[in-house]
Image (tube, coloured by chain):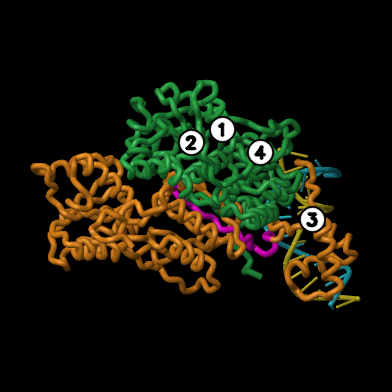
Chain colours: A orange, B green, C cyan, D yellow
Amino acid sequence: MRKKSNAPTMKDVAQEAGVALGTVSKVFNGIPVGKSYRLRVEDAAKKLGYQVNTYARGLKTNRTFTVAVIMPFITHPFFGELTEQISRCLAARDYRTMLAVTTSDLAVEQHCIEMVQQNKVDGIIALTYHPDLIVDDDLPFVSIDRFYSAAIPCVASDNYGGGVLAADTLSRLGCRNLLFVRHGAAVAGEPDKRGAGFETGCRQNGLPCTSFQVNDEDGKSPILEFLDAHIRDGRFEYDGIFCNTDALAVQVMVHLRSRRIRIPEDVQVIGFDGLMDPFLNKPVCSSIVQPIAQLAETAVDILLSQDRSRLPALTCLPVSFRPGGTTREEMS
Amino acid sequence: MRKKSNAPTMKDVAQEAGVALGTVSKVFNGIPVGKSYRLRVEDAAKKLGYQVNTYARGLKTNRTFTVAVIMPFITHPFFGELTEQISRCLAARDYRTMLAVTTSDLAVEQHCIEMVQQNKVDGIIALTYHPDLIVDDDLPFVSIDRFYSAAIPCVASDNYGGGVLAADTLSRLGCRNLLFVRHGAAVAGEPDKRGAGFETGCRQNGLPCTSFQVNDEDGKSPILEFLDAHIRDGRFEYDGIFCNTDALAVQVMVHLRSRRIRIPEDVQVIGFDGLMDPFLNKPVCSSIVQPIAQLAETAVDILLSQDRSRLPALTCLPVSFRPGGTTREEMS
DNA sequence: TTGTAAGCGTTATCAC
DNA sequence: GTGATAACGCTTACAA
């Protein structure tokens, strides 16, 4: 056994202050106690550098003030920002963040969930790719961007509305022949509604719309090949593109520029996410902006809400359009 | 008090298996036990969905298999990558990651340290900006990129060597008039050695070198003004620039290009960090690459090393040069 | 208002 | 090899 920790305990504080153990506990729990006692205890605690042991406390109270955050990656700007915001929200309420990075691998995700369950976290906020994870029923769980069932509250951006907004915006900016390209895991998550929204928006605006979608395994080259196939005599057939992520938008734009297609003069491009260039601190492209801070705040709110009997199954947060130099419009 | 958790305990497992409590404990700690007993216990545990409660365990053993990671941000690509790698290293050893994001604010940093100390973490890995943090002496602590004292092990890239390497590389690539620009917090951390290394490297190569350094409060515009001041008749005075971070390199390049200075034809630029563009998956610029995965691995190794009596005060990891299109050299 | 003591889930030391 | 039992540091009735 490890050398007995020499950190002071409540007992030490009680002895130092010359009061009973229970009194010390009360002081640290804000339970009224004679003023002179309180002062003696506080002095003693400061002198000894005493800190409550939340493990021991949790053993009694079944609350640890710790929330697990499970993310596939944090190197992707969207996930990184989301994780940071969640952690800040939690810290603001004096909750700790237990972080697990899963690479979106089922086994790892499951293992993480087991690990954090062992640590008796008070809840889990997760962005996962596998609907068949096994989680303790009575462990509060909030899913981000993935709606699994009415029993698991999900917080997401209004992906469908964002798609419509993209179509409306491109229409307003004068586009007449639209293209939607989608790239990414074919999970049945909320983000998949972006395309449906866009198609609806195009229909409402009376605009023709082509969709080209590839899944992760296909790599991204099919999209670039598709683009090439639609360049005739140096002119691109479409005058507006909606990409399901900013990352894809950037790839598409780099490719088109290499083919001497100008953006936004020849074709306007809108992405989804609203990411900022980490170095230049400006948008990477015109985009449908996800309210990351609100996503974080809302997820934390729901997770920690007192009354867990009636939680919204799906909370959709409003998105907005932000020009970013890849559409014909002055930037705000 | 919260509704008593209905999670199964060792006692439940013991009852279900018809063995004594201690026997169950032994099974879960790998202590030899009769085969038939072990099987009965394992079956019972599976049936009940039992998981060891690490809080209760920690109370006895003073080990929690949890490490706190303290970072100023995780939205910056370098910090994000570092955090992710550390978390993976820890997970590989069955350690949990407790994440604290501090915005590099002293009060927040101190508060985080107190929070994690309450949680009785087994150690802290931190990248902080304030040398005067108060940390429990006997709580294992590893600092990244900041050398505070011989008592606190620090893991960092070979920043000095990287500076020399940058000078050598620019020299090899034909530069004759070099510039070093530095931007960022004026903390007395390891990264500040980059400039010293570069200047030494220039001297060794017999090349003239100008240094222009601004601190965070100054904003970045002084650097851009400095650049402008050294453009005469559309020609830039320097033919090689070393920036103390990739982020700065990107800003410098955007500015120079807006002034019609070509990179790498007119001036070659080397940054520091070796970051990849998160969307295009290619280097953002030619750069001195920090071995992030090794930094993480080493920090974890040192933190968890058994014999803590003799730890290296400063571990410098080797950096390397990687072409990234902003120097005149084919990219590997 | 203050002190006492039981118990949270686990480990470890014992007799058996 | 197995099974009671006393801690670990804390909270919380309950008694003083």
Magenta residues, as a range? A58-73
Q: Chain of mark 3?
A: A
Determine the CA span between mark 3 and mark 2: 41 Å
Res. B272 mark: 2
Residue B41 at least partly seen: no
Mark in the foreground, 3 or 2: 2
Residue A201 relative to residue A94: left or right: left
Q: Is residue A259 left or right of residue B227?
A: left
Of all chains, the one bearing label 1 is B
How far apart marks 3 and 4 lie (CA) works out to: 25 Å
Q: CA distance from mark 1 to mark 4?
A: 12 Å
Report how many numbered discs are placed on residues in the image. Answer: 4
Residue topped by disc 4: B147
Earlier residue among tags 4 and 2? 4
Whole-percent x, y for residue B122 in the image: 68, 45
Question: Same chain, marks 1 and 4?
Answer: yes
- Vertical position of residue B205 compared to residue B159: above or below: above
At a point 57% along the width and 48% down the height, the residue shown is: B71
Q: Residues within 10 Å of mark 2 (few under 14, many from 20)?
A: many
* Residue A111 as seen in the image, left or right of residue A218: right
> For this view, does A2 lie left or right of residue A167?
right
Image position, residue A266 (x, y; %): 17, 51
Which one is in front, A13 or B189?
B189
Asked if residue B328 lies in the magenta stretch, the reply is no
- Classify the position of the C terminus of chain A by image quarter: bottom left
Graded by Cα atoms within 10 Å as few (under 14), some (14 to 19) or many (20 or more), the crowding at tag 3 reads few
Q: Local crowd at mark 1 within 10 Å, few (<14), some, or many (≥20)?
A: many
